Image (cartoon, helix red, strand yellow):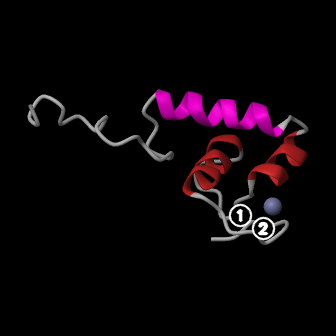
Amino acid sequence: MRCTDCGSPLSYDEIGLTKKLVRRDAQNCFCLPCLAKKFDVPESRLREKTEEYRAAGCLLFVQPEGLKGSREESR
Ligand SMILES: [Zn+2]
């Protein structure tokens, strides 16, 4: 998938963030710089939000390995 505004390739996190900020079933996704422009916030703020959602375990964002709930079994 590519950014609707500028055509750059999108990361999974950017698509997830679009869904969080725009709407869950957004068809048009945007890269971080374009989202920042759209919502008039600094890119750094969007990165913070991404990390917040990730830390909350939101599946729209890439989750770190090992946090997927099988820690008990792998011991
Ligand atoms: Zn863009």
Quadrant in which the N terminus is drawn: bottom right
Q: Which residues are magenta?
A: 43-55
Residue 41: image location, x then y, percent: 86, 35
Q: Nearer the viewer, residue 61 or 71?
A: 71
Q: Earlier in the sequence, mark 1 or mark 2?
A: 2
Q: In what element is the residue under mark 2?
A: loop
Residue 69 part of the magenta-drawn span: no
Q: Quadrant of ligand 1?
A: bottom right
In this figure, what is the number of numbered marks? 2
Residue 18: image location, x then y, percent: 67, 50
Query: Could you say which quadrant of the image residue 11 lies in?
Result: bottom right
Q: Are marks 1 and 2 in contact (CB under 8 Å)?
A: yes
What residue does disc 1 label?
Answer: 28
Q: Is mark 1 within 8 Å of ligand 1?
A: no
Residue 68: image location, x then y, percent: 28, 39
Q: Nearer the viewer, residue 64 or 38?
A: 64
Extreme-front residue of the structure? 75
The circle drawn on residue 4 is: 2
Q: Main secondary structure of the magenta part?
A: helix
Residue found 86% across the figure and 40% down from its top: 39
Q: Amino acid at mark 2?
A: Thr
Residue found 75% across the figure and 69% down from its top: 8
Residue found 50% across the figure and 47% down from its top: 60
Q: Is residue 57 left or right of residue 32?
A: left
Residue 47 part of the magenta-drawn span: yes
Q: CA distance from mark 1 to mark 2?
A: 6 Å
Q: In what element is the residue under mark 1?
A: loop
Q: Is mark 2 within 8 Å of ligand 1?
A: yes
Q: Amino acid at mark 1?
A: Asn
Q: Nearer the viewer, residue 75 or 10?
A: 75
Give the answer, above or below, for where 75 lies relative to 9.
above
